[in-house]
Image (cartoon, rainbow, N blue to C red):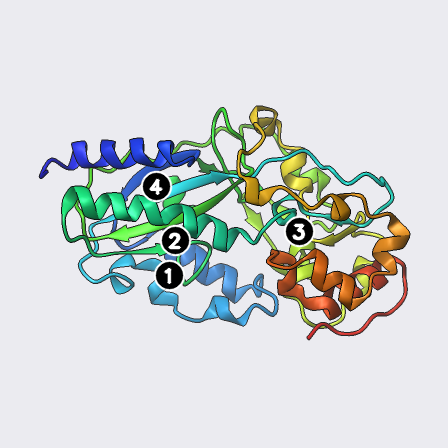
């Protein structure tokens, strides 16, 4: 099949059949608008200690350096929305994206049948899959592919669906008809900016070094004391800017069994969280994204919430 429009339509239909919330296509060209934005963000030190953000600058901006001969970037969204389920209102909070199995593994597994379908339908196709991995500016590609626009909190928002979804990409040498880029619908709203307890958000920008998700996951050093009493109870990640976004009234619960949390995890009391041993941590978070912070990192976060100095994360 040689028609780029028909090929794109078949891929989108298959993606929806496989459970993806949305699928769009962008031309695999150099991200000219993103280059100065990324450079300024790095120059201002907004990446904090995330040194990996400073590497592979060219790869982040040019998909043909990741897949030689690439013609299209297929951007996909995978829903993970679930209402907060923790039963103890005083328990340390866990971002809902981390309730179940590590999304990197789950979403990549869901991509494999789509890739097999493309090979079957279109013959030998050169492509690579990315799930929040490798130097790919996934939000820029989602915006270009019409998945949604980057809100003032910089998360991608989709009309009628909100922002509680993971993004992933297939970069391919297959020529596909691109979609129209998404347009901004934030208007004058600034709820995410006003709600952020650490003042990490400015309109269409986030100071990563102040974001609670960064402080509880990426930062390996002691959490700065200036954030004491400003963590709003979060021990791994943070959902505040999404919870207050009016567009998320359109979010619907996910249908992914592997994102369903363990009953024991949801039922943990505040005392059980703070008394958690490494053995319990390993059992509760086996296969979970929470493993990224390791036990020492979670212990540091829990101690910080209680106002006691904890160990530095490994």
For mark 2, what is the residue?
Answer: 34
Q: Is residue 256 visible?
A: yes
For mark 1, what is the residue?
Answer: 60
For mark 3, what is the residue?
Answer: 200
For mark 4, what is the residue?
Answer: 144
Asked whether disc 2 touches disc 3, contact meaning CB atoms under 8 Å apart, the reply is: no
Q: CA distance from mark 1 to mark 4?
A: 15 Å
**Where's residue 16, x and y in %?**
37, 32
Task: Tell me the residue at 17%/32% (across/down).
Answer: 6
Hey, which quadrant is residue 293 in on the image? bottom right
Q: Is residue 123 above or below residue 6?
A: below
- Secondary structure type for disc 2: helix
Hey, which quadrant is residue 62 in on the image? bottom left
Query: Few, some or many C-alpha atoms within 10 Å of disc 3 (few <14, some 14-19, many ≥20)?
Result: many
Task: Tell me the residue at 37%/47% (across/down).
Answer: 111
Q: Nearer the viewer, mark 3 or mark 1?
A: 1
Q: CA distance from mark 1 to mark 2?
A: 9 Å
Asked whether disc 1 touches disc 2, contact meaning CB atoms under 8 Å apart, the reply is: yes
Answer with mark 1 or mark 2, whichever residue precedes in sequence: 2
- Secondary structure type for disc 1: helix
Q: Is residue 146 visible?
A: no
Q: CA distance from mark 2 to mark 3?
A: 20 Å
Q: Is residue 236 above or below residue 157?
A: below
């Amino acid at each position: 099949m040689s028609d780029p429009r028909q090929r794109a339509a078949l891929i989108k239909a298959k993606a929806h059949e496989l459970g993806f919330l949305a699928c769009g296509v962008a031309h695999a060209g150099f991200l000219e608008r993103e280059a100065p934005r990324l450079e300024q963000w790095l120059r201002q030190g907004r990446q904090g200690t995330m040194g990996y953000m400073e590497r592979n600058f060219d790869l982040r901006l040019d998909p043909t350096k990741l897949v030689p001969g690439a013609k299209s970037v297929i951007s996909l969204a995978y829903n993970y929305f679930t209402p907060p389920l923790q039963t103890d209102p005083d328990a340390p909070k866990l971002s809902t994206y981390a309730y179940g199995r590590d999304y990197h593994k789950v979403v990549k597994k869901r991509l494999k049948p789509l890739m097999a379908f493309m090979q079957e339908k279109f013959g030998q196709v050169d492509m690579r899959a990315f799930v929040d991995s490798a130097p790919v500016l996934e939000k820029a590609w989602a915006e270009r592919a019409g998945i949604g626009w980057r809100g003032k909190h910089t998360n991608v928002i989709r009309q009628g669906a909100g922002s509680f979804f993971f993004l992933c990409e297939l970069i391919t040498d297959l020529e596909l008809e691109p979609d129209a880029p998404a347009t901004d619908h934030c208007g004058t709203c600034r709820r995410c900016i006003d709600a952020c307890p650490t003042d990490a958000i400015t309109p269409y920008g986030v100071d990563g070094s102040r974001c609670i998700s960064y402080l509880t996951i990426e930062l390996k050093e002691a959490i700065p004391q200036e954030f004491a009493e400003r963590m709003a109870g979060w021990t791994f990640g943070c959902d505040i800017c999404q919870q207050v976004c009016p567009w998320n009234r359109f979010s619907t619960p996910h249908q992914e069994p592997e994102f369903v949390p363990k009953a024991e995890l949801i039922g943990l009391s505040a005392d059980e969280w703070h008394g958690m041993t490494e053995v319990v941590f390993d059992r509760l978070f086996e296969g979970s994204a929470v493993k990224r912070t390791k036990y020492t990192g979670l212990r540091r976060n829990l101690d910080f919430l209680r106002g006691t100095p904890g160990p530095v994360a490994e």
